[in-house]
Protein backbone atom coordinates (compact mmCIF):
# COMPACT_ATOMS: atom_id res chain seq x y z
CA UNK A 1 0.00 0.00 0.00
CA UNK A 2 2.84 2.40 0.88
CA UNK A 3 4.41 2.04 -2.57
CA UNK A 4 1.06 2.60 -4.28
CA UNK A 5 0.61 5.90 -2.42
CA UNK A 6 4.20 6.86 -3.24
CA UNK A 7 3.58 6.12 -6.92
CA UNK A 8 0.40 8.22 -6.93
CA UNK A 9 2.13 11.14 -5.18
CA UNK A 10 5.15 10.91 -7.51
CA UNK A 11 2.81 10.87 -10.53
CA UNK A 12 0.98 13.99 -9.37
CA UNK A 13 4.25 15.78 -8.62
CA UNK A 14 5.65 14.68 -11.98
CA UNK A 15 2.64 16.02 -13.87
CA UNK A 16 2.90 19.36 -12.09
CA UNK A 17 6.63 19.45 -12.91
CA UNK A 18 5.86 18.77 -16.59
CA UNK A 19 3.32 21.61 -16.64
CA UNK A 20 5.79 24.10 -15.19
CA UNK A 21 8.68 22.71 -17.24
CA UNK A 22 6.84 23.20 -20.52
CA UNK A 23 5.45 26.53 -19.36
CA UNK A 24 8.79 27.99 -18.32
CA UNK A 25 10.57 26.55 -21.37
CA UNK A 26 8.09 27.56 -24.06
CA UNK A 27 5.72 30.21 -22.64
CA UNK A 28 7.53 31.94 -19.77
CA UNK A 29 5.85 35.35 -20.03
CA UNK A 30 2.37 33.87 -20.32
CA UNK A 31 2.99 31.49 -17.41
CA UNK A 32 4.29 34.24 -15.14
CA UNK A 33 1.32 36.46 -16.06
CA UNK A 34 -1.10 33.59 -15.39
CA UNK A 35 0.50 33.11 -11.96
CA UNK A 36 0.23 36.83 -11.21
CA UNK A 37 3.94 37.64 -11.42
CA UNK A 38 6.02 39.93 -13.59
CA UNK A 39 7.85 38.21 -16.44
CA UNK A 40 11.37 36.99 -15.68
CA UNK A 41 14.34 36.99 -18.05
CA UNK A 42 14.02 34.26 -20.67
CA UNK A 43 17.28 32.57 -19.73
CA UNK A 44 16.12 32.25 -16.10
CA UNK A 45 12.83 30.82 -17.29
CA UNK A 46 14.76 28.33 -19.41
CA UNK A 47 16.86 27.29 -16.42
CA UNK A 48 13.71 26.83 -14.34
CA UNK A 49 12.06 24.88 -17.16
CA UNK A 50 14.99 22.50 -17.36
CA UNK A 51 14.88 21.97 -13.57
CA UNK A 52 11.17 21.20 -13.66
CA UNK A 53 11.52 18.75 -16.57
CA UNK A 54 14.47 16.99 -14.91
CA UNK A 55 12.46 16.55 -11.72
CA UNK A 56 9.50 15.26 -13.77
CA UNK A 57 11.80 12.64 -15.29
CA UNK A 58 13.04 11.72 -11.82
CA UNK A 59 9.48 11.25 -10.58
CA UNK A 60 8.70 9.09 -13.64
CA UNK A 61 11.59 6.82 -12.62
CA UNK A 62 10.30 6.70 -9.04
CA UNK A 63 6.87 5.64 -10.32
CA UNK A 64 8.44 2.76 -12.28
CA UNK A 65 10.59 1.48 -9.41
CA UNK A 66 10.37 3.21 -6.02
CA UNK A 67 13.02 0.99 -4.44
CA UNK A 68 15.63 1.37 -7.15
CA UNK A 69 15.10 5.14 -7.38
CA UNK A 70 14.63 5.90 -3.69
CA UNK A 71 17.44 8.46 -3.81
CA UNK A 72 15.49 10.46 -6.39
CA UNK A 73 12.53 10.56 -4.01
CA UNK A 74 14.75 12.01 -1.29
CA UNK A 75 16.28 14.49 -3.72
CA UNK A 76 12.74 15.69 -4.48
CA UNK A 77 12.11 16.05 -0.75
CA UNK A 78 15.17 18.32 -0.62
CA UNK A 79 14.09 20.33 -3.66
CA UNK A 80 10.58 20.82 -2.30
CA UNK A 81 11.96 21.81 1.10
CA UNK A 82 14.10 24.49 -0.55
CA UNK A 83 11.02 25.65 -2.48
CA UNK A 84 9.07 26.10 0.77
CA UNK A 85 11.93 27.99 2.42
CA UNK A 86 12.37 30.31 -0.57
CA UNK A 87 8.62 31.01 -0.68
CA UNK A 88 8.53 31.80 3.05
CA UNK A 89 11.50 34.14 2.66
CA UNK A 90 9.69 35.85 -0.21
CA UNK A 91 6.69 36.46 2.06
CA UNK A 92 8.95 37.78 4.82
CA UNK A 93 10.46 40.15 2.25
CA UNK A 94 7.08 41.49 1.21
CA UNK A 95 5.55 39.10 -1.35
CA UNK A 96 1.78 38.82 -0.86
CA UNK A 97 0.96 35.77 1.26
CA UNK A 98 -2.13 35.01 -0.81
CA UNK A 99 -0.01 34.87 -3.94
CA UNK A 100 2.59 32.63 -2.29
CA UNK A 101 0.28 30.13 -0.58
CA UNK A 102 0.46 27.61 -3.43
CA UNK A 103 4.25 27.85 -3.39
CA UNK A 104 4.24 27.10 0.33
CA UNK A 105 1.40 24.65 0.90
CA UNK A 106 1.85 22.26 -2.07
CA UNK A 107 5.61 21.74 -1.68
CA UNK A 108 5.15 21.31 2.08
CA UNK A 109 2.48 18.69 1.40
CA UNK A 110 4.84 16.87 -1.00
CA UNK A 111 7.63 16.94 1.60
CA UNK A 112 5.36 15.36 4.20
CA UNK A 113 3.85 12.73 1.89
CA UNK A 114 7.13 11.78 0.24
CA UNK A 115 8.86 11.57 3.62
CA UNK A 116 6.16 9.27 4.97
CA UNK A 117 5.89 6.96 1.97
CA UNK A 118 9.42 6.99 0.54
CA UNK A 119 11.73 4.03 0.80
CA UNK A 120 13.91 4.50 3.85
CA UNK A 121 16.86 2.44 2.61
CA UNK A 122 18.90 3.99 -0.16
Image (spheres, helix red, strand yellow):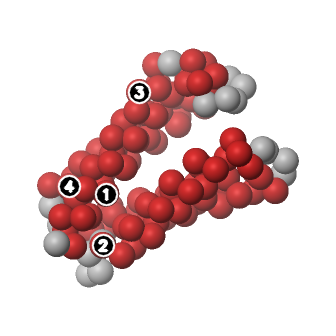
Number of the front mark, 3 or 2? 2
- Image marks 2 and 1: residues in contact by CB distance under 8 Å: yes
Q: Label 3 belongs to which residue?
A: 22
What mark, if any, has residue 63 been given in the picture?
4
| Alpha carbon separation for disc pair 2 and 1 | 9 Å
Q: Label 2 belongs to which residue?
A: 117
| Foreground residue among 121 and 109 | 109
Which residue corresponds to the image point at 58% horizontal and 47% vertical from the top-left? 102
Which residue corresponds to the image point at 60% horizontal and 55% vertical from the top-left? 104
Identity of the residue furthest to the right in this view: 94
| Alpha carbon separation for disc pair 1 and 3 | 20 Å
| Alpha carbon separation for disc pair 4 and 2 | 12 Å
Which residue corresponds to the image point at 32% horizontal and 48% vertical from the top-left? 12
Q: Earlier in the sequence, mark 1 or mark 4?
A: 1
**Residue 44 is drawn in which quadrant?**
top right
- Image marks 4 and 3: residues in contact by CB distance under 8 Å: no
Q: Label 1 belongs to which residue?
A: 9
| Foreground residue among 92 and 52 | 92
**Residue 57 is drawn in which quadrant?**
top left
Amino acid sequence: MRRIVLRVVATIIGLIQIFFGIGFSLFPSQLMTMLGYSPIPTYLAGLAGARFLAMAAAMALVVTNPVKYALLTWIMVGVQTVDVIVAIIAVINGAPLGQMMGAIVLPALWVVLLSIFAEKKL
